Amino acid sequence: MTAMSPNPTRRSLHGIAELVLAGPQFRATGEIMLRVAEGGFATAFAPELRFDGAAVVAGEQRIEAAGLSYADIAARAGVVAGEPAGLYKDGSGAAPDELVVLDPATARAILDAFAAGDEALRRFAPDAERVLWPEHFDVGITIEAVNYGVAPGDDHVPEPYAYVSPHTAQDGEFWNLPFGAARPVRELGAATAIHAFFETGRRLAR
């Protein structure tokens, strides 16, 4: 996987995950992992924050994100916006004073893909901890030196896609990208088909 191409909604969702959820969580607990939640995504540790597709939810507050800066959203949620500093080089590229842009259809496609991917990963490896990582903004797991997950789109595939990424190079037509194999979620469809793609990848990975 690689840096994301400039899709404003994808960048904004990534920015919310990184600056408003993961950054404050890291400063409070030392943990950056997020999780897929109903309708969107959420922190895995304190502070308890969730993005529901249009708004950041903090306790009884529901803060509509579009048109606000990450700093404003965070302040209303009672935290300070900022990435988990010093942990990785890549990320959303968003700055705290940048305004959030959300196209509802694009956001829903990404969040629905995360939900389907999370369900597929649960079926594929029930005992593995599924993590939404703030660096690359993908939900995934690693089993026996192979990464499995769903990403929202990037320079390789400009739409949400499922991937199988072994830690060693692979040969064969299944492996269609430099990092392994990827298929658009739009083509795979439901979690059952994503699960089947993961199973094929596990069988073919050397």
Image (cartoon, grey):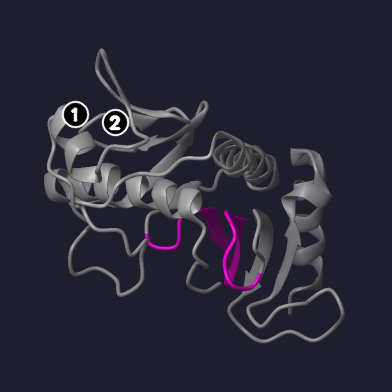
Residue 49: assigned label = 2
Amino acid, disc 2:
Leu
Outermost residue, front direction? 67
Comparing 48 with 206, the one in front is 48
- Contact between marks 1 and 2 (CB within 8 A): the answer is yes
| Left-right relation of 67 to 37 | left
* The N terminus lies in quadrant: bottom right
Residue 97: assigned label = none
Q: Residue at x 76, y 61 (%)?
A: 183
Residue beneath disc 1: 77
Nearer-N-terminus badge (1/2): 2
Query: Does dot 1 land on a helix, a strand or a loop?
Result: helix
The range drawn in magenta is 135-156
Quadrant in the rendering for residue 170: bottom right
* The C terminus lies in quadrant: bottom right
Residue 102, how many percent across, how many down?
46, 40
Residue 117, how many percent across, how many down?
64, 45
